[in-house]
């Protein structure tokens, strides 16, 4: 089967599946301490042979990758306070503040 026939089939099939033929990717770069990303989620751990649900707080610098992780029952603001002490300061902004959105901002590049 000729290569052009396979390419035509793949192109047609991608359109049928709703897949984009081209992906646009904008590389991102940040100055140190410019932006940070925060995640708050539930996780499970085995503690003293017992399955336990934990609240996990994670923050990382977008430029340096410096991170702080904590699994505890502390409140969201308290977790920020401990993280900023650990990281020796806060970030200028977050992706949510920059975009005005309260949803997860991802970088797929």
Image (cartoon, rainbow, N blue to C red):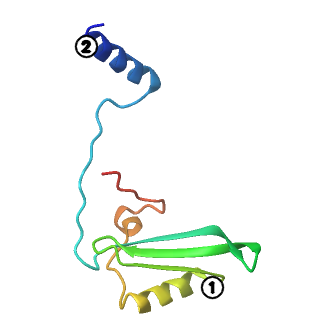
Q: Looking at the image, which residue is at 36% across and 61% down?
A: 99
Residue 12: image quadrant is: top left
Residue highlighted by disc 1: 74
Whether 106 is drawn above or below 76: the answer is: above
Residue 68 on image: x %, y %:
45, 80
Residue 70: image quadrant is: bottom right
Whether 21 is drawn above or below 3: the answer is: below
Residue 95 on image: x %, y %:
37, 66
Residue 42 on image: x %, y %:
64, 68
Name the secondary structure under disc 1. Answer: loop
Q: Is residue 12 left or right of residue 64?
A: right
First in residue order: circle 1 vs circle 2: 2
Residue highlighted by disc 2: 3
Q: Which mark is residue 102?
A: none
Q: Is residue 63 left or right of residue 54?
A: left
**Image depth: mark 1 or mark 2 in front:** 2
Residue 96 versus residue 34: which sits nearer the camera? Answer: 34
| The furthest residue to the top | 1
Q: Looking at the image, which residue is at 35% across and 31% down?
A: 20
Whether 53 is drawn above or below 26: the answer is: below
Within 10 Å of the Cα at label 2, are there few (<14), some (14-19), or many (20+) other Cα atoms?
few
Q: Looking at the image, which residue is at 42% across and 90% down?
A: 86
Whether 12 is drawn above or below 91: the answer is: above
Q: Looking at the image, which residue is at 35% across and 78% down?
A: 66
Residue 105 versus residue 50: which sits nearer the camera? Answer: 50
Within 10 Å of the Cα at label 1, are there few (<14), some (14-19), or many (20+) other Cα atoms?
few
Name the secondary structure under disc 2. Answer: helix
């Amino acid at each position: 089967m000729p290569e052009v026939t396979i390419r035509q089939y793949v192109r047609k099939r991608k359109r049928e599946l709703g897949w984009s033929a081209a992906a646009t990717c904008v590389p991102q770069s940040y100055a140190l301490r410019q932006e940070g990303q925060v995640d708050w989620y539930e996780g499970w751990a085995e503690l003293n042979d017992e399955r336990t649900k934990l609240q996990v707080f994670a923050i990382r610098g977008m430029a340096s990758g410096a991170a702080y992780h904590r699994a505890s029952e502390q409140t969201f603001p308290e977790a920020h306070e401990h993280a900023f002490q650990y990281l020796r300061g806060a970030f200028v902004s977050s992706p949510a503040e920059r975009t005005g959105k309260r949803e997860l901002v991802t970088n797929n590049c």
